[in-house]
Image (cartoon, grey):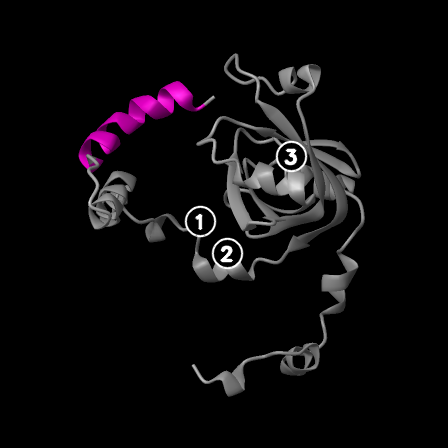
């Protein structure tokens, strides 16, 4: 790549593109409107982006639609369900409260975006209010909304994300066990990828909540 073509200033960047579409600016709000709330409440999947001293993190979060609770026009809450305990997102939030959320709704081309600041709450009553399958989350991420707006369909139309004919068979890609075994072998370590994959369905069943 030729460094002469690297964009290094705001002036150079803005010279590459036309002015923002007025609609793209009009749709941005500092609060969640009734229409925006309907979209968020219909979403079973959100991507959470965070930043901290150790770098950036982008984490998928999913549950039945409505799991991200719209408390009021300036507040949403996300239960932190059981995971791998790396805590990358939560560590970042403790260090830097800035977060970004991207909501997807199956079959819908538009996405919804929220930028704001988050805290982590372990309030027992709040945690209990998010109980699923008899289990409460360890904590709840409480986001104060600063900006919210929908994103147009272009990315999902181009990617054909919801097109069944474009879905890839799982067997076409390496399993997690296979990938981990390859990594272990490169480090002269032992890892049974087949055993890991075989045990995963039951492990998922036992640890999903």
User: Residue beneath label 2, please?
Assistant: 156
Instruction: Give the CA distance from mark 3 to mark 1.
Output: 19 Å
| Residue 104 visible in the snapshot | no
Q: Mark 3 to mark 2: distance in Å?
A: 20 Å
Q: Which mark is residue 162?
A: 1
Taking the view exactly as shown, the residue that stands out farthest to the bottom is 4
* Nearer to us in this view, 116 or 43: 116
Secondary structure type for disc 1: loop
Residue 4 x %, y %: 52, 87
The quadrant of the picture occupied by the N terminus is: bottom left
Asked whether the viewer can see residue 150, the reply is yes
Find disc 3 in the rendering and name its residue: 41
Residue 34 image position (x, y, % from top left): 77, 39
Picture quadrant of residue 189: top left
Rate crowding at label 3 as few (under 14), some (14 to 19) or many (20 or more) other CA atoms within 10 Å.
some
Label whose residue precedes the other's in the sequence (3 or 2): 3
Q: Pointer 1: residues within 10 angstroms few (<14), some, or many (20+)?
A: some
The residue depicted at 19 percent of the width and 34 percent of the height is 192
Judge whether residue 143 is colored magenta. no
Foreground: 129 or 98?
Answer: 98
* Label 3 vs label 1, nearer the camera: 3
CA–CA distance in space, label 2 to label 1: 8 Å
Depicted 110 relative to depicted 136: above or below: below
The residue sitting at 54% across, 80% down in the picture is: 6
> Above or below — where is 76 with respect to 168?
above
> Do labels 2 and 1 touch, CB within 8 Å?
yes
Describe residue 105's horizontal placement relative to residue 116 as left or right.
left
- The span picked out in magenta is 193-208
Percent across and percent down for residue 117 are 72, 43
């Amino acid at each position: 790549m030729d460094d002469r073509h690297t964009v290094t200033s705001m002036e150079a960047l803005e010279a590459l593109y036309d002015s923002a579409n007025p609609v793209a600016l009009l749709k941005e709000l500092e609060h969640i409107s009734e229409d925006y709330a309907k979209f968020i409440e219909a979403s079973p999947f959100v991507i959470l982006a965070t930043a901290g001293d150790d770098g950036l993190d982008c984490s998928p979060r999913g549950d039945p639609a409505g799991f991200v609770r719209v408390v009021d026009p300036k507040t949403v809450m996300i239960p932190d369900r059981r995971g791998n305990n790396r805590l990358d997102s939560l560590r970042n939030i403790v260090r830097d409260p800035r977060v970004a959320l991207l909501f997807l709704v199956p079959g819908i081309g538009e996405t919804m975006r929220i930028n704001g600041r988050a805290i982590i709450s372990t309030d027992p009553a709040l945690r209990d209010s998010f109980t699923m399958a008899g289990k409460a989350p360890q904590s709840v991420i409480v986001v104060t909304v600063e900006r919210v707006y929908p994103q147009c369909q272009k990315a999902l139309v181009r990617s054909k994300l919801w097109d069944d004919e474009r879905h890839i068979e799982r067997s076409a890609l390496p399993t997690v066990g296979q990938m981990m075994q390859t990594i272990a072998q490169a480090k002269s370590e032992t890892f049974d990828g087949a055993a890991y994959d075989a045990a995963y369905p039951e492990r998922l069943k036992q640890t999903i909540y």
